[in-house]
Image: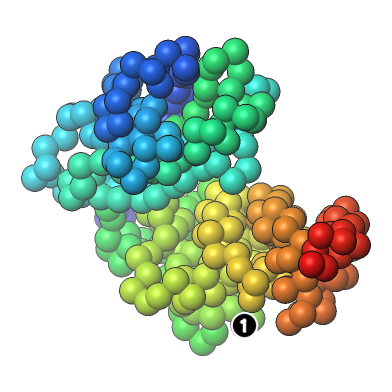
C-alpha cells in the first residue's frame, strides 16, 4: 500500500504584523534607553509572538537609534522539536511601501533563542529628517514565517514519482511538490503527463548537483540549508540559486537570494551582482547595487578595477554618471 503524502503540513505559516507607532516624539521623551514598548501578542503557527519597540535603543551602544525585537510569547514548550522562524522588519513610507535600505531579516530556532531583532534599525536623527515620519507616526512591518524542522532525506524517500539527473547525480522526488513551487516545472510535467508514473527522467547537465540539492531543500522545507563555510561561499551559492530560481520561476527563492546578495555588495562584487540583477530582473537587488554605487568615490573605485561597470551603469542608471562627473568637476574635491 502506498504511503499517503501530506505536503501541506510542512509549509510555513506566515503572518504579517504592521506595527504603527503613534506619537513618536512623546514615546521618545517618555522612554529611557533600554526601555521597550511592548505591542500586543499575535499568532503565527501555533506560537505567540510579541514585538518590542525601543524608542531610544535597547543598549547604550544603540542610544541614538531605534531598536526593534521580537520574542516568543508562549504556545510551545522548549522541549518540543525546534521551530525555525524567519523574521523580517521593514520600515514603510507614507504610501505603505517598503523603504530600501531600512530592513533586517534572519532565521533562528525558537527553542534555542529567546528573541531576534535589530539594535541599529534606524538612526533617530535620520528618521526625523526624512519623509518616513508622517504626522508623528512611524510604520514598521514585521513578517514572521514559522515551520518545524524536517528531515529532507526522509521526505524524499516517500513514494517519489520522477527522477532528475543533475550533473551525473540522480534525485528521485515528487512532481506535485516541485510543481507547486515552479510554474515552469509544472508546465514541463504537464507535457510529460502521458508517461507512466515513475518512468519520467529529466536531465539537467548545466547545473551543479549541490545547487539542485539546495533547491530541493528549499522546496521541501521552505528554508535554505545551513552553510558550514564562510560568507563568500554563501554568496557564491546564492548566485547559483538565483540563476536557478529565475530559470524555474521560483519567486520566493529568488527573493531570498536577492536578500543574501544585497548584504554582500562591495567594490569587488557589485559589477557581477548588478549584472545578475539586470539579467534576471531582480529589482530589489538592482536597486541595492545602484544605491551602493550612488556615492561618486565608490563608483570611481569600482571603475578603476572593473571597466564593465561603466556600461552597466550607463544602461541602468545614467544619472549616477552625471553625479560622478559633477563630483569630479567640483573644485572642493581637488583641494
Q: Would residue 262 be seen by someone viewing this image from the given angle? A: yes
193 to 238, vertically: above or below: above
Seen from the viewer's position, the closer of residues 101 and 50 is 101
Residue 176 % position (x, y) = 49, 52
Residue 77 % position (x, y) = 11, 37
> Residue visible at 53% across and 17% down?
137
Residue under label 1, please give it. Answer: 205
Task: Using a 10 Å C-alpha cutoff, classify the residue at mark 1 as few (fewer than 14 neighbours), some (14 to 19) or many (20 or more).
Answer: few
Is 37 on the left-hand or right-hand side of 261?
left
318 to 18, vertically: above or below: below
Instruction: Give the residue at the far front of this rendering.
Output: 335
Based on the displayed image, in which of its 4 quarters is residue 271 positioned? bottom right
259 to 308, vertically: above or below: above
Instruction: Give the residue at the far left of this rendering.
Output: 79
Based on the displayed image, in which of its 4 quarters is residue 309 positioned? bottom right
Is 224 on the left-hand or right-hand side of 168?
left
> Residue visible at 72% across and 58% down?
295
> Residue visible at 52% across and 70% down?
235
Residue 332 % position (x, y) = 81, 60
Based on the displayed image, in which of its 4 quarters is residue 320 positioned? bottom right
Amino acid at each position: 500500500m502506498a504511503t499517503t503524502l501530506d505536503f501541506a503540513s510542512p509549509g510555513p505559516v506566515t503572518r504579517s504584523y504592521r506595527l504603527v507607532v503613534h506619537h513618536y516624539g512623546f514615546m521618545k521623551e517618555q522612554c529611557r534607553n533600554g526601555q521597550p514598548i511592548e505591542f500586543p501578542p499575535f499568532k503565527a503557527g501555533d506560537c505567540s509572538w510579541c514585538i518590542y519597540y525601543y524608542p531610544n535603543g535597547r543598549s547604550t551602544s544603540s542610544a541614538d537609534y531605534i531598536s526593534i525585537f521580537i520574542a516568543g510569547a508562549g504556545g510551545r514548550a522548549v522541549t518540543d522539536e525546534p521551530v525555525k522562524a524567519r523574521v523580517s522588519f521593514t520600515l514603510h513610507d507614507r504610501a505603505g511601501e517598503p523603504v530600501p535600505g531600512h530592513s533586517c531579516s534572519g532565521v533562528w530556532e525558537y527553542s534555542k533563542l529567546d528573541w531576534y531583532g535589530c539594535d541599529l534599525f534606524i538612526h533617530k536623527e535620520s528618521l526625523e529628517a526624512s519623509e518616513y515620519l508622517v504626522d508623528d507616526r512611524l510604520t514598521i512591518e514585521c513578517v514572521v514565517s514559522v515551520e518545524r524542522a524536517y528531515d529532507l532525506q526522509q521526505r524524499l524517500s516517500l513514494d517519489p514519482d520522477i527522477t532528475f539527473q543533475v550533473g551525473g547525480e540522480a534525485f528521485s522526488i515528487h512532481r506535485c511538490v516541485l510543481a507547486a513551487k515552479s510554474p515552469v516545472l509544472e508546465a514541463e510535467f504537464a507535457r510529460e503527463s502521458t508517461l507512466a508514473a515513475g518512468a519520467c527522467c529529466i536531465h539537467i547537465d548545466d547545473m551543479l548537483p549541490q545547487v539542485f540539492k539546495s533547491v530541493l531543500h528549499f522546496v521541501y522545507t521552505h528554508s535554505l540549508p545551513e552553510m558550514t563555510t564562510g560568507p563568500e561561499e554563501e554568496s557564491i551559492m546564492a548566485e547559483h540559486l538565483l540563476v536557478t530560481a529565475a530559470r524555474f520561476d521560483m519567486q520566493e527563492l529568488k527573493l531570498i537570494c536577492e536578500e543574501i546578495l544585497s548584504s554582500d555588495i562591495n567594490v569587488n562584487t557589485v559589477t557581477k551582482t548588478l549584472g545578475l540583477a539586470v539579467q534576471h530582473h531582480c529589482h530589489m537587488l538592482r536597486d541595492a547595487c545602484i544605491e551602493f554605487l550612488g556615492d561618486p568615490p565608490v563608483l570611481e573605485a569600482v571603475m578603476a578595477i572593473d571597466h564593465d561597470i561603466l556600461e552597466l551603469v550607463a544602461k541602468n542608471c545614467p544619472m549616477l554618471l552625471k553625479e560622478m562627473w559633477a563630483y569630479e568637476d567640483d573644485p572642493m574635491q581637488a583641494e
